[in-house]
Image (cartoon, coloured by chain):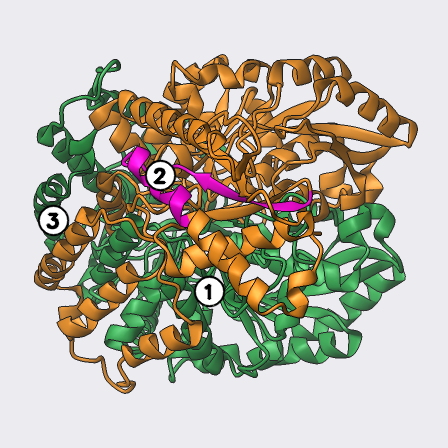
Chain colours: A green, B orange
Amino acid sequence: MASVFDPERFRENISNIAPRLERYLADRSTRGLDLVDPAVLTKAARGLMTTERDRIADFDADRLNQIVDLYTGTGIHVYSPGYMGRQFSGVVPLAGLVDLVSSVVNQPSTFYEAGQLPNVAERLMAEELGRLIGWDPGRLAMVTTSGGSLANLTALLAARNRAFPGMLAGGAAGVRDGIPAVAVSEEVHYSVTRAAGVLGVGERQIVRLPVDRSGRVRADRVAPALDAAHRRGLRVFCLVASAGTTSMGAFDPLAELAAVTRPRGIWLHVDGAHGASLLVSRRHRDRLRGIEHADSLAWDAHKMLFVPAPCTLLFYRDGAAARGAFGRPPGGRGASYVFDEEPDVYSALDSGDQNFECTKRPMIMPLWTLWAVYGPALFERKIDRLCATTRHAFRMLRAEPDFDVLHEPEANILCFRYRPADLEPSALHRLQLAVRHRLRGDGRFFVSKVDVGGVAALRVVLMNHRIGTAHLAQLITEIRTTGQRVLREEAAAPGPRAERSPR
Amino acid sequence: MASVFDPERFRENISNIAPRLERYLADRSTRGLDLVDPAVLTKAARGLMTTERDRIADFDADRLNQIVDLYTGTGIHVYSPGYMGRQFSGVVPLAGLVDLVSSVVNQPSTFYEAGQLPNVAERLMAEELGRLIGWDPGRLAMVTTSGGSLANLTALLAARNRAFPGMLAGGAAGVRDGIPAVAVSEEVHYSVTRAAGVLGVGERQIVRLPVDRSGRVRADRVAPALDAAHRRGLRVFCLVASAGTTSMGAFDPLAELAAVTRPRGIWLHVDGAHGASLLVSRRHRDRLRGIEHADSLAWDAHKMLFVPAPCTLLFYRDGAAARGAFGRPPGGRGASYVFDEEPDVYSALDSGDQNFECTKRPMIMPLWTLWAVYGPALFERKIDRLCATTRHAFRMLRAEPDFDVLHEPEANILCFRYRPADLEPSALHRLQLAVRHRLRGDGRFFVSKVDVGGVAALRVVLMNHRIGTAHLAQLITEIRTTGQRVLREEAAAPGPRAERSPR
């Protein structure tokens, strides 16, 4: 066993793995996804596993190298300019190295005692980013958590407990004054609607707020919707707005929404998983105008701050609300192993009573290190470039007669359809799906799809600052070529699927 | 910006950081915790941040090195034999390198498309570990999630939805046939009781099952407790047992509990965050006798399988139950960006509809890689050694007249008190707290504390296979010396705190 933990072995392994990662980082070829059949990949992976069971297998550098090669060779290629499909990115490579340090020192960040620098770094980043939000630094609170979905759940829980303080202890019996309900944009992320089911609110008690064609909540429709809900006996305790919807990157009108929620005592939560990072950009932060009036904000640094996933920051305007999510500190019986009965200067920084995790990865460290080493301008430059490139893509696509662009991009997400002039309307939906799948498998581009108004659209999320005009022109050409090929094949062999209507 | 993403820069940074980690790994000195005042550490950390805001700061290797040194120099020292306080460990260093690869390739594991090898590796580990549990491999399901607390929450949610299928959509109005309730050991982890509050069940609807002196649920008291709950109108839908309690590492009698829950249709969830790993040990797996009858099992690989935190595996005996946690796949409106309307061979491996996370770290990769490279014997050897050392510590402490050992260790957790013959009973509680704090600050050992029967005890969790008899003897001596010093100081200057009773 000693050799397994040997620092020399560690050094040798680094010297094998590092050049592989360097080559990976240096590969800027435009490519889609090498989507391998799971059965084939399973067989390959199983073949790399030692069959030794009775003793510790001798270390085999070849085996390790093959594992690393299989890992880097499959899945999305986040550094390729062909990668345009998802909201996580080719990270700043230094962030990966900080994660290496984190994984070796293994200091969870839920308790100061165990992870001192991570806890301090969380406070420093709360200060830096809180300033951009515009909240009172002496009053706000920030907790890190494992992804935007959890951040949304945590914020909704805090809001639920503020409005229905008896529910934590009493469950349904603890509810007074109306049926708990939440109001959300029709375009809200699925984690929010799901949270209503998790928290005992019930998905039927979700009030859907209509959106305009760009995917933004229509501010003028909010008060009537809330009034109607009230008449049905619902008590809306939280309104969830999006700062960057997942589908189209649309920013809800926060100032206008706050003007409706505040007088009614409704908690305004902003799901800024994607778009909160625009606060770092002087050019684009106005998209979040009104954020200072929100009660909480979920912010994924692993999206537009370019660190490894997950690194989510959940901000509360009022720190006391953060402690309300889980009620009183869960001390006393059963938890005396982590919670001190007499808080001191150290445990004052503990966050275990404010997030779902007990043992939590020190996810702030890559972000704080990049911020410390390069300053905010690194993030601002990259955000500005991505938004500019997306704007450029919008103009290019709009100029193509056989493409429909569905909205003006507000950030770096753009939805459009390939729609040649002679296309049957009923074939539009399936054509987009077919194009996406072909591109993914055979082509040089990985794009995603999304339903807009019930009909599929192609969607690009430009996360790579190396994407330029030439790549976008290639993408357009490849979509057109692929689309034409799909249509030719279907015309030659019309199957039952070809007649299907769009959903 | 180009230089920030430059592979050359990456190589240079590795060559700076790697030797630092090597030295860190090579340092086996016995030491406690260098607990720094948060204000002091904050000042030091802030001093390492560039003040450049308008442009990207020039890279400064010194700055980075100082950050890494501050990181490795503070917090717990998981590779030191003096580290005995928590359940996460000095990981197998190779696991950290796999995390480096993960952070660079940044392939989330919630969807096969994005992270192909991680998804396949999850299936392979489900197969390997599922075999040890003894469940039907064709029927079980496993999802990874960000920590044991989330795994417990997810399992309770699945159990709630099976018993009260109307609750997801209807909330409280969807509840039929009795008031939802859960039964838990008095020693259950706080995440479980907290989950009742989160899920709309309410903490008041928790039925507490009494434990014996070792912290195990008393099987003979379970049926009467459930009957009494039934008479109060409660419908217990889930019983949560512990396979390794946090306080004392006690294993509940699973076979006996299953004999009570099964005929009543109650879901048996086992929180095996700490102890499930004993299944890998032929010598110790009998501690989980009866696990084959459970419905779900939470298993933290970042505890006794020695990988970086978090890496939690949630197993379900019946895979259909896994899909019940969040109800129908959250497709349709709002989530068409990730969920396909027509599942294919690829999306069949997606797990996004089975866990709280949307973007999820490929946390299985360090575990699978170690398993592939070294085989199960690596884990078995280390587990066996840790349990043997803890047994040895038990015998040593029992032989000391001024120490009380509170239980025979079942795994690698041991609770005891320093109790010199002339000690006032009322001073026992505070003496343990004082000893722990002194040891942590000035001494060479980091131990934790826990309340047992309302009185504080010292607690060691032996996670480091390098801990031997000499370290244990040192620990005993240091506790005694420290305890005597505390008592002398209090006798010399009796303050108001010295008279306080134990809680």
Q: Which residue is mark 3?
A: A18
Tag in front: 3 or 2:
2
Residue kind at label 1, given as amino acid type: Gly
Q: Do the residues marked 2 and 1 share a common chain?
A: no
Q: Nearer the viewer, residue A296 or A219?
A: A296
Circles 3 and 2: CB atoms closer than 8 Å: no
Q: CA distance from mark 2 to mark 1?
A: 62 Å
Is residue B182 toward the left or the right of residue B328 in the image? Answer: right
Q: Chain of mark 3?
A: A
Asked if A443 appears above or below A372 in the picture, the reply is above
Q: Chain of mark 2?
A: B
Is residue B472 part of the magenta span, yes or no? yes
Q: Chain of mark 1?
A: A
The quadrant in which the C terminus of chain A is found is top right
* Residue A78 spot, x, y in % from top left: 26, 52
SS under mark 1: loop
SS under mark 3: helix
Circles 2 and 1: CB atoms closer than 8 Å: no
Residue kind at label 3, given as amino acid type: Ala
- Magenta extent: B454-478
Residue shown at 8%/42% (left/top)? A12
Residue count near mark 1 (Cα–Cα under 10 Å), binned few <14, some 14–19, many ≥20: many
Mark drawn on residue A14: none
Residue count near mark 3 (Cα–Cα under 10 Å), binned few <14, some 14–19, many ≥20: some
